[in-house]
Image (spheres, rainbow, N blue to C red):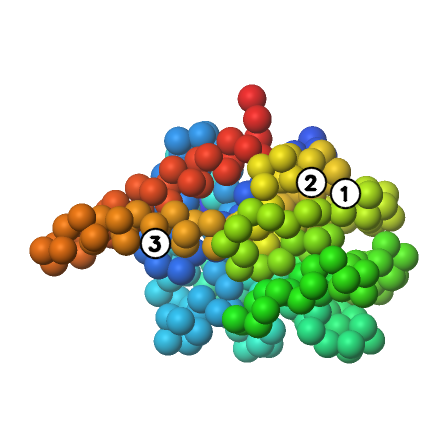
Amino acid sequence: PLVTTGELITRAAATRSAVAAFNIITLEHVEAVVAGAETTGTPVVLQVSENAVRFRYGRLLPLARAAAAAAERAAVPVALHLDHVQSDDLLRQAPDAGFSSVMYDAARLPYAENLAATRAAAGWAHAHGLWIEAELGQIGGKDGRPPLDAHAPGARTDPAQARDFVAATGVDALAVAIGSAHAMTTRTATLDHGLLRRLAAALPVPLVLHGSSGVPDEGLVAAVAGGISKVNVGTALNAAMTGAVREFLEAHPEAVDTRTYLGVGREAMAREVARLIGVLTPG
Ligand code: G3H
Ligand code: ZN
């Protein structure tokens, strides 16, 4: 069934566990994530980024409707989340398109502007029943830009500043920069677990890990133990699908029917979803 992101994250935070949030781009992503979650019997978040909307010719509704239909029929609770929203126009489409939550991304702006923009977005979101996540610090690696040095101290989220930011904006969750970066195809990110514990102690809201594809399994387990309640994964699913499709097409150069290779790619993606959920929710 379709549920809200807020209820999934609240429950996860209360039990020191985490909800996996997977970025969806195609219908195959939707089906693979739901299938992987059903295999493990675990709730999941389907998230659509502003970049994914751009890929869909700028239209949110076709993918959103597919995701909502899949969520309603799923055997596990599924929530819909709008990810890395920079455009106020897209933010305003969220409630009618079936999303219960948004991540408003103004982290590229200087601190005072990030705070002002996020406070305004949070006011609008709450007035329209949306749960809202924001970002402070520089996680990096978005929009084809090289990941900025994730280990540079200035890129990291400062606990005292984060406490002020959350209090001033009223956001429901915070994405923190603790050493991960977006779009990594190697799992070599080293998280600063000491900083994560300080952030968790300083902040009254659940914390979100972005760029989780680059974090090794042990790092993910430690991050959840340290206070991460939402784990965002995108690139790892694309890598699983693309690898399987590439292998299939190399072995079957005569293939024409799109279902043959998309089916293989979807299966590989569903297996990676189930594997990652297993890492995040052991037992
Ligand atoms: O918001 C989305 C996530 O941060 C995905 O990052 O593609 O590096 O796993 P990733
Ligand atoms: Zn992200």
- Disc 1 on helix, strand or loop? helix
- Examine the rendered structure and indicate whether residue 168 appears above or below residue 203: below
Q: Which amino acid, mark 3?
A: Thr
Residue 108, position as x, y percentages in the image: 69, 73
Residue at x-position 87% and y-position 61%: 161
Q: Which amino acid, mark 1?
A: His
Q: Quadrant of residue 91?
A: bottom right
> What's the mark number on residue 193?
1
| Residues tagged 3 and 1 counted as in contact (Cβ below 8 A) | no
Q: Earlier in the sequence, mark 3 or mark 2?
A: 2
Q: Among all residues in the image, which is located at the extreme left?
A: 254
- Examine the rendered structure and indicate whether residue 189 appears above or below residue 99: above
- Disc 2 on helix, strand or loop? helix
Q: Which amino acid, mark 2?
A: Ala
Q: Nearer the viewer, residue 153 or 43?
A: 153
- Disc 3 on helix, strand or loop? helix
Q: Nearer the viewer, residue 217 or 69?
A: 217
Residue 269, position as x, y percentages in the image: 37, 45
Residue at x-position 35% and y-position 65%: 62
Check disc 3 and report the residue beneath it: 242
